[in-house]
Image (spheres, grey):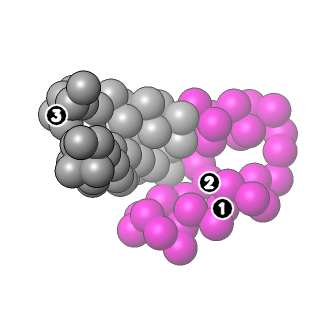
Amino acid sequence: MKLNVKALALTSGIMWGLTVFVATLWLIVGGYSGHFIRLLDHFYFGYRFSVLGAFIGLLWGFVDGLICGAIFGWLYNKLAV
């Protein structure tokens, strides 16, 4: 059985982008200092622990998830014989 690489890539991108977005906003609203999630600014250019940063994280998370999902799907299809 082969995976649909495009569908997996899009699903991964949407899910990871939304995860970064929701986690950032949830932690801001909850009053958390954001120490752990602030580490994303080392990987996502322009990301900050703020509302604007949540939107930037959404975009970077989508791109990151899209690429990782595509690589995973492609590799899975190559290895699943």
Read off the residue under disc 1. 38
Report whether 39 appears left or right of 58.
right
**Which quadrant would residue 77 be assigned to in this image?**
top left
Q: Secondary structure at mark 3?
A: helix
Question: Looking at numbered disc 2 in the image, what kind of residue is underneath it?
Answer: Phe
Q: Residue at x 71, y 39 (%)?
A: 28
Place of residue 12 in the rendered image (x, y in percent of width and height, measured from the top left): 37, 36
Q: Residue at x 43, y 30 (%)?
A: 15
Place of residue 35 in the rendered image (x, y in percent of width and height, measured from the top left): 78, 61
Which range of residues does the magenta coloring cover? 22-50
Read off the residue under disc 2. 49
Dot in front, 1 or 2 = 1
Question: Looking at numbered disc 1 in the image, what kind of residue is underneath it?
Answer: Arg
Q: Earlier in the sequence, mark 3 or mark 1?
A: 3
**In the image shown, does 42 or 53 lie closer to the viewer?**
42
Query: How far apart, in angstroms, are the residues tagged by discs 1 and 2?
Result: 6 Å
Read off the residue under disc 3. 6
**In the image shown, does 31 or 37 lie closer to the viewer?**
37
Place of residue 44 in the rendered image (x, y in percent of width and height, measured from the top left): 43, 64
Query: How far apart, in angstroms, are the residues tagged by discs 3 and 1?
Result: 30 Å
Packing grade of label 2 (10 A; few <14, some 14-19, many >=20) is many
Observer able to see residue 10: no
Q: Residue at x 82, y 53 (%)?
A: 33
**In the image shown, does 1 or 7 lie closer to the viewer?**
1
Packing grade of label 1 (10 A; few <14, some 14-19, many >=20) is some
Q: Earlier in the sequence, mark 1 or mark 2?
A: 1
Place of residue 45 in the rendered image (x, y in percent of width and height, measured from the top left): 39, 68
Observer able to see residue 50: yes
Dot in front, 3 or 2 = 3
Query: Tag on residue 56?
Result: none
